[in-house]
Image: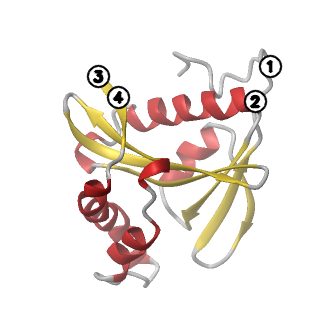
Amino acid sequence: MRWTLRPADPADVEVIAELRASVLRPDLERLGRFDEHRVRQRLRDSFSPQYTSVIVADGAFAGCVTVRPAEGGRWLENFYLDPAVQGRGLGTAVLRTLLDRTDAEGMAVRLIVLRGSAARRLYERHGFTVERADPVDILMVRQPAARGDGDGAAAPGAG
């Protein structure tokens, strides 16, 4: 699958809000937290096109990811893939590219994943560990990989 990242545009907010709702629905329903309006509005309220990239695969919208500056590192947010492209290595490829960048900057990366989400396994494979958890959210952190440390977490072509 050929893919690229392009800068988000303010006009992307609605397609991303819809993707968020469809991707998060099963986990939010399992947790008793799904609200048809709120799941979209939270994205609209926090959408930052300057920090968001749209994932384009084989010429079509395939997802999005936000990497925001934060004290002492970066926040990885709104990393959603269209279910039609999930399970084909795209999430791994995009995450590896982003982590290469943060490693080069010497930045830690934090994210929040819903408890019980399959996405947690992806993050753990790339060196994220649990920093703290509550009944709904798990806060994970990944320290920057040292250059040449051989862990393979962010090595191009690994996996």
Q: Residue at x 63, y 44 (%)?
A: 124
Q: Residue 24's x, y, as percent?
A: 37, 66
Amino acid bearing label 4: Thr
* First along the sequence among labels 2 and 4: 4
Q: Amino acid at mark 1?
A: Asp
Q: Position of residue 27 (x, y in %)?
A: 41, 69
Secondary structure beneath dot 2 equals loop
Is the Cβ of the residue at disc 3 closer than 8 Å to that at disc 1?
no
72 or 85, which lies in front?
Answer: 72
107 to the left or right of 90: right
Residue 43: x and y in percent read 40, 68
**Residue in the picture at 34% in, 62% down:** 20
Q: Kindly state the secondary structure of the residue where label 4 is placed.
A: strand
Please name the residue that numbered disc 1 is placed on. Answer: 149
Q: Is residue 29 above or below residue 86?
A: below
How many residues crowd mark 2 within 10 Å: few (<14), some (14–19), many (20+)? many
Which class describes the residues within 10 Å of circle 3: few (<14), some (14-19), or many (20+)?
few
Q: CA distance from mark 2 to mark 4?
A: 24 Å
Identify the residue at image location x=46%, y=34%: 94
Mark 3: which amino acid?
A: Arg
Callout 4 crowding tier (Cα within 10 Å): few <14, some 14–19, many ≥20: few
Q: Number of labelled discs?
A: 4
Q: Amino acid at mark 2?
A: Ala
Residue annotated with mark 4: 4
Disc 3: which residue: 2
Q: From mark 3 to mark 1, how far is it between C-alphas?
A: 29 Å
Residues under numbered marks 1 and 2 in contact, where contact means CB atoms less than 8 Å apart: yes
Q: Quadrant of residue 37?
A: bottom left
Report which residue position mark 2 lands on: 145
Mark-to-mark CA distance, 3 and 4 = 7 Å
Q: Element at badge 3?
A: loop
